[in-house]
Image: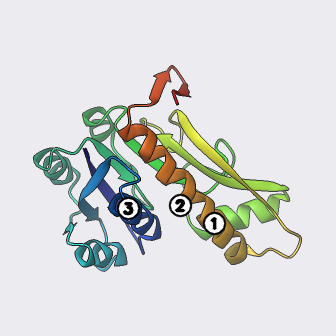
Amino acid sequence: MLNIGVLVSGGGTNLQAIIDETLAEKINGQVKVVISNKKNAFGLERAKTNNIDAIYETDENKIIEILKEKNIDLVVLAGYLKIISPKFVSEFENKMINIHPSLIPAFCGEGYYGQRVHQAVLDRGVKVTGATVHFVDEGADTGPIIIQGTVEVRNDDDAPTLAKRVLEVEHKILKESIRLFCENKLNIQGRRVFINE
């Protein structure tokens, strides 16, 4: 069973989806620690409710230290609104994944987070959006893509309604990506990730 560390900045709905999946034993892993760079992030409360170590920390070196002390095999950025340094990436190379609420490479990178992403999708007039789980590299949302899920953009959508439907897809593909990682079924070759089911 692999040890999972989750980094959050907000409410932690993706975190809750991961916790539920591990408790249902659908993932061969357990969430050992939740770390937030925001003291009042509700994600920390979700962790405490589930008897998971919940830590507020902004110093990246200390975060790395905590993850190593907990013997973390996989780091999940689940709504973590802070750019990760190259040092952090190298410490957990090919062992850190992120969920992003668009179909990368569209509507991603610095400045694209939360409702901004969905508003940009609407402003551009695209017909399909979605979510992407990818390995983290030194760029912003540029790492090898694991899974993408799509959502139709409806004529009557606004940013909140679109965000709600995208979030459902986020939960689904994030849980699946973690399951695959924990079962050692992901094979990275250059920019591509092959799934060995």
Which x, y percent locates residue 56? 22, 69
Residue that protrudes farthest toward the top in the picture = 189
Instruction: State whether residue 50 appears in this view.
Output: yes
Residues packed near mark 2 inside 10 Å, few (<14), some (14 to 19) or many (20 plus): some
Q: Quadrant of residue 81?
A: bottom left
Identified at 41% across, 53% down, the residue is 26
Closer to us: mark 1 or mark 2?
Answer: 2
Estimate the spatial distance between the alpha carbons at disc 1 and disc 3, rounded to whole Å: 33 Å
The image shows residue 12 at horizontal and vertical percentages of: 41, 70
Q: Is residue 148 left or right of residue 157?
A: left
Left of 144 or right of it: where is 83? left
Find numbered disc 2 in the image and state the secondary structure of the residue it sits on.
Answer: helix
Indicate which disc residue 116 carries: 1
- Circle 1 packing at 10 Å, graded few (<14), some (14-19), many (20+), is some
Q: Which residue is mark 3?
A: 24
- Distance of mark 1 from mark 2, alpha carbons? 19 Å
Number of numbered discs on residues: 3
Horizontally, is 32 left or right of 187 in the view? Answer: left
